[in-house]
Image (cartoon, rainbow, N blue to C red):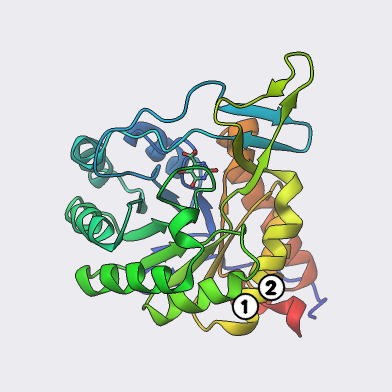
């Protein structure tokens, strides 16, 4: 591992034709329902922003409470609230007029629905697509279909055959074999996999004597899941050739470096933005640059996968 401090580091990164000024992407679902907030995240320093997952029809989401804050992480069961793809065109129009690098996240019940949404998102100007195959608490979509490698392969390959932009598959950690899901996405032609979505979990309100979330089950994000995200990225790196986008509990530039060393090509930031606000992007960037300079890594390809050597 290089140890000679250097002057400048280059954080630019490219996945297919998608160019990013740094590897810090805003994760889906965080500020992702309106163009203004996505633009604000980009202006605050994100390398790219991912929209909230959008479906064919408007959807209200699960009943309240939809959020429970643990000291070590955030539990959510939003239930895919979104305005529906046709209504979302307005936000994409605004985004197109901005500088932001926008990845459109979509969810559906089957490959036909994913293909329908993918065509629309591409038409609206998304630079890449993220297929949500991993929401842990919604009936008939997300992890319910994304835990089966053959379904993942079929959905990814149908979308890849339809659009001309890069297709990312966001994978669930709620499985005994995330590598099989990653391989299926790669075989389907995905340009990258995103690992991980939230970890299925729950909370109990001891005073009410019942589950704390309206939906009972939700997805855990934040600090608590960083070791799980790292393990998934590390395992996927050993068996895939396509880039891995690492997500889960990143709260510092050093955390970003750890994900890169585990094999992440880029990373996504979610819960930290919710708790700390948009200034987190510039702080993460500064901390990552400081770490790389001090440790002598000139660019991302030098640090990426270092934990495997
Ligand atoms: O909307 C949600 O409840 C949600 C989604 Br789509 C997801 O992919 N992951 C998550 O933790 N929550």
Image quadrant where one finds the C terminus: bottom right
Q: Evaluate whether residue 111 shows in this view.
A: yes
Q: Position of residue 67 (x, y in %)?
A: 60, 28
**Which quarter of the picture shows residue 127?**
bottom left
Q: Secondary structure at mark 1?
A: helix
Residue linked to disc 2? 234
Image quadrant where one finds the N terminus: bottom right
Q: Secondary structure at mark 2?
A: helix
306 or 130, nearer to the observer: 130
Residue 154 shown left or right of residue 301 in the figure: left
Q: Position of residue 96 (x, y in %)?
A: 24, 46
239 or 39, nearer to the observer: 239
- Check if mark 2's residue and mark 1's residue have beta carbons within 8 Å: yes
Whole-angstrom CA distance, mark 2 to mark 1, is: 5 Å
23 or 92, nearer to the observer: 92
Q: Residue furthest top?
A: 207
Residue linked to disc 1? 237
Relative vertical location of residue 239 with respect to residue 300 in this rendering, above or below: below
Q: Residue furthest right?
A: 3
- The structure residue drawn at horizontal position 78% and vertical position 80%, both measured from the top left corner, is 2
- The structure residue drawn at horizontal position 23% and vertical position 60%, both measured from the top left corner, is 112
Residue 258 shown left or right of residue 100 in the figure: right
Q: Residues within 10 Å of mark 2 (few under 14, many from 20)?
A: many
Q: Residue furthest front?
A: 209
Residue 133 shown left or right of residue 283 in the figure: left
């Amino acid at each position: 591992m290089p140890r000679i401090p250097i002057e400048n580091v280059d954080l630019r990164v490219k996945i297919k034709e998608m160019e990013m000024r740094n590897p810090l992407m805003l994760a889906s679902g965080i500020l992702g329902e309106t163009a203004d907030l996505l633009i604000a995240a980009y202006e605050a320093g994100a390398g790219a922003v991912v929209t909230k997952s959008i479906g064919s029809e408007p959807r209200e989401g699960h009943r309240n409470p939809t959020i429970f804050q643990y000291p070590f992480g955030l539990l959510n069961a939003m239930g895919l609230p979104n305005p529906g793809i046709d209504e979302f065109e307005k936000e994409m129009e605004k985004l197109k007029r901005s500088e932001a690098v926008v990845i459109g996240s979509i969810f559906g019940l089957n490959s036909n629905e994913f293909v329908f949404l993918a065509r629309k998102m591409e038409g609206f100007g998304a630079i890449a697509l993220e297929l949500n195959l991993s929401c842990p608490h919604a009936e008939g979509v997300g992890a319910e279909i994304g835990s089966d490698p053959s379904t993942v392969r079929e959905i990814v390959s149908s979308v890849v055959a339809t659009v001309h932009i890069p297709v990312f598959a966001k994978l669930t950690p709620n499985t005994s074999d995330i590598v099989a899901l990653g391989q299926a996405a790669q075989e389907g032609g995905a340009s990258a996999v995103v690992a991980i979505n939230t970890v299925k979990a729950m909370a109990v309100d001891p005073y009410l004597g019942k589950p704390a979330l309206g939906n009972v089950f939700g997805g855990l994000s934040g600090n608590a899941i960083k070791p799980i995200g790292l393990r998934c990225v590390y395992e996927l790196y050993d068996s895939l050739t396509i880039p891995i986008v690492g997500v889960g509990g990143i709260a510092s530039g050093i955390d970003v470096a750890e994900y890169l060393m585990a094999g992440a090509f880029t990373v996504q930031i979610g819960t930290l933005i919710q708790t700390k606000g948009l200034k987190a992007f510039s702080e993460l960037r500064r901390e990552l640059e400081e770490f790389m300079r001090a440790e002598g890594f000139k660019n991302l390809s030098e640090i990426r996968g270092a934990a495997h050597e």
